Amino acid sequence: MSGLSVHALHKARGGRPVLSGVDLAVRPGEVVALLGPSGAGKTTLFRCVAGLDAPDGGRVTVDRAELTALAGRPLAQARRRVALVYQQFNLLRRLSALDNVLAGRLHTIPLWRAALRRFPDADRQAALGALDRVGLLDKAYARADRLSGGQQQRVALARALVQDAALLLADEPVASLDPETASGVMALLRELAAERGLAVLVSLHQVDQALAFADRVLGLSAGRIAFDLPPAAVTPDRLRTLFGGRELPVASVVGVI
């Protein structure tokens, strides 16, 4: 299928199962939120889906390419269809917002051009267009370390846009942002998914953000999918069971309890 398909995914570390037969799918244009306590396997799942870790069993398919059946150059090419956005933004702080966005095009140019940051005009125009779409065209030449946290995360989203990805994996993208800024970033993420046909899988600790902006919510517990539901069906009892009374901030469940 287009988008993301994960089937019977298994992964162990140090002989301990971390993922135990995970099945999930994210369609193009869909935002799916992943909830779960620490140790549930969220980071391992993201690394396997991104092709950064090889699973012990199962299949990961992105945009009809089965990553788990590839190696070497074909795997590297398929991984370019997966964009990653992190809590820490992963920007080069001394470079401008524009240069950080252009990093999403590094795989398309010769090494010497990349070293000199001599990108084709078409790439520069695409990067400026992406910054405009996320509302930061006026910050194109500002250093990344001069931007606010919310602005830096928008730069990271613009970088994902110019990468021409089919799948966006966002690992706790709003964890370090205040609630208002976090809502703005999540709303933008949802808009971009619909506009670009991006399949978006986003790991969150903020339950309220998952319920407000996701099309579906997955609960991951002990390496297994505990539920796969529309936000309206995610009840307080399901959340309490998922988190086992741990880690769930009271503010996150306002409106669902």
Image (tube, helix red, strand yellow):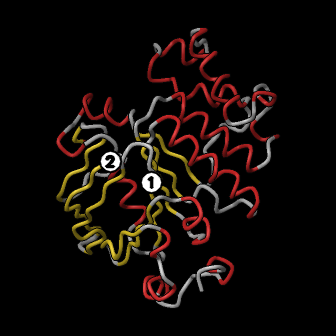
- The residue most toward the top is 121
- SS type, badge 2: strand
Residue 61, image quadrant: top left
The reply to whether dot 2 and dot 1 touch (C-beta < 8 Å) is yes
Of labels 2 and 1, earlier in sequence is: 2
Position in image of residue 173 (x %, y %):
59, 55
Disc 1 on helix, strand or loop?
Answer: strand
Q: Position of residue 3 (x, y in %)?
A: 34, 43
Whether residue 127 is situated above or below residue 154 in the rendered picture: above
**Does residue 85 appear to the left or right of 24 in the view shown?**
right
Picture quadrant where residue 13 is located = bottom left
Quadrant holding the N terminus: top left
Relative side of 22 to 170, left or right: left
Q: Quadrant of the C terminus?
A: bottom right
Residue at 30% x, 73% y is 224
Packing grade of label 1 (10 A; few <14, some 14-19, many >=20) is: many
Residue at numbered disc 2: 4
Q: CA distance from mark 2 to mark 1?
A: 9 Å
Task: Identify the amino acid type marked 1.
Answer: Leu
Residue plotted at (38% across, 53% down)? 47
Q: Quadrant of residue 29?
A: top left
Q: Which residue is mark 1?
A: 201
Residue at image point 36% right, 60% down: 45
Q: Residue at x 17, y 42 (%)?
A: 69
